[in-house]
Image (cartoon, rainbow, N blue to C red):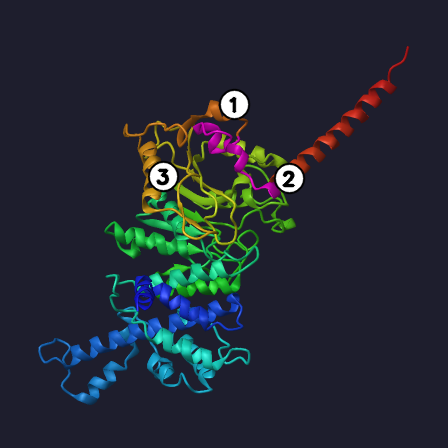
Amino acid sequence: MAARQGRAAAKSDKSLEQRLWETADALRGNQEPSEYKHVVLGLVFLKYISDRFEECRQSIEASLSDPNSDDYIPNESRRAQFIEDRDEYSSHNVFWVPSNARWQHIQDRAKLASIGQDIDEAMDLIEKENPSIRGVLPRNYGREGLDKGRLGQLVDLIGSIGFTETDDHGSDDVLGRVYEYFLGQFAGKETGKDAGAFYTPRSVVKTLVEMLEPYSGRVFDPACGSGGMFVQSAEFVKAHGGRRTDISVYGQEFTDTTWKLAKMNLALRAIEADLGDRSADSFTQDLHPDLRADFVLANPPFNVSNWWDAKLTDDPRWRYGVPPEGNANFAWVQHFIHHLSPRGTAGFVLANGSLSSKTSGEGEIRRKLVEADLADCIVAMPDKLFFNTGIPVSLWFVSKDRHGNGHRERKGEVLFIDARKLGRMETRRLRVLSDDDIAKITGTYHAWRNHDGAYQDVPGFAKAASLDEITAHDFVLTPGRYVGSEEAELDDEPIEEKIERLKKELFAEFERGRELEALIRKRLEGLSL
């Protein structure tokens, strides 16, 4: 009896999204996470827009039927016409959902063998009626390898969620919580180097957004994944009394399926965004060539080696040096800077090797960025924050407006924050930053940035370093070198990257040695008695 009560209590302690995930994952069967995520998230999308549609429909019907309403229509047949008028829904920013695509129709057919084809038809109908998501929704629910019994059970499960209702935690963003939780869980389920490419953990995104404070203006992410930076930016604006329309959203994504996920994610949140008309490579097919953003927020793929194209050789973006063909890190940095407005600021995630690497001209590019007074702040983050890698990363902040809006006395100075000891382990493999952790990082940055007298260096955590100090460290930007933590740089670079970097540096020294030997031989041969 006590054991049963304990199990019941444990179940009740689980959040809505945890209970849904466990059931949905149990229904996965032989489906790979990379495929199954589109099955689940497509159904979540379908259920949500159907819930919104039905809620709007009931509101319109109540207004038209109320004799005291200005919209009252006494004639029942005319009322029915208005209720099915798609313009009524468009005016409320609600997707038009045809009758055979509404959730009740899908739910009624959940136990039929044709449920897969029925869902595919629903997706087709919705796209035809709503051009903004044309070509985006997942298909192939009718494929042979997808168990229709399990699919029907999944329909029943998702049908149990009222996405437009307030849940038992008092949240009116049930959809947002479920969708984000599922994105994160799928990132954790997948394997390989691209496992987390479509999803940046919430605590990392929130840190970037809280640092930059995008209250209004143009927000750009040229490696936008599933759109998490935009969602968090919109939430930030809303939390501070603004409207989502206070920011204009621009993005680009290389992987087609992830681009579609982003379109769905933003459509669900009613966030209007220009993600281009297709997925595309940001370097060779920049879809926003003339955009100059007020804020750039990004988590680009780390250390990409196959990014180079010969036509990029004389690209105007490489103002601070041509990036090495074998690593795209500083190509991303310069791409971000290129797209900043004259008063813009960028915050982005980079692998720690970018803080100290001197191979293939990376050290020179880093030096020029610092000497151009673009480097604003570097934050060393804890390890195990990402689903697809346990290595630590750094947050970079660069700004074109460091001599105004509170930066007047910060010229020639960079703030270094060592946050590697923050966070708690949520699972054996994954660490998260708490709101207090994020507040500690962002509070330090804003105190320094605003120069209101509140900022103080904190030994082992934060240090505002001068250009002379950075020059003395040969423009290595590892925070541990400046804040005073012991042996800080030993853990800053993944061992694989360190070995590769040291090999390249050693081979380069060998080459210089051979050149020097040849020069000496030539000089000696020219000597005579």
Q: Residue at x 17, y 80 (%)?
A: 64
Residue 343 is labelled as none
Residue tagged 1? 472
Q: Is residue 47 left or right of residue 321?
A: left
Q: Residue at x 71, y 30 (%)?
A: 509
Q: CA distance from mark 3 to mark 2?
A: 31 Å
First-in-chain label (2 vs 1)? 1
Q: Quadrant of residue 172?
A: bottom left
Residue 62 % position (x, y): 17, 78
Q: Residue at x 30, y 64 (%)?
A: 9
Q: CA distance from mark 2 to mark 1?
A: 25 Å
Q: Nearer the viewer, residue 496 or 219?
A: 496
Q: Residues within 10 Å of mark 3 (few under 14, many from 20)?
A: many
Would you say residue 137 is visible in this rendering? no
In the image, the segment drawn in magenta is 476-497
Task: Decide whether residue 366 is among the magenta residues.
Answer: no
Q: Secondary structure at mark 2?
A: helix
Residue tagged 3? 441
Residue 499 is labelled as 2
Q: Amino acid at mark 1?
A: Ala
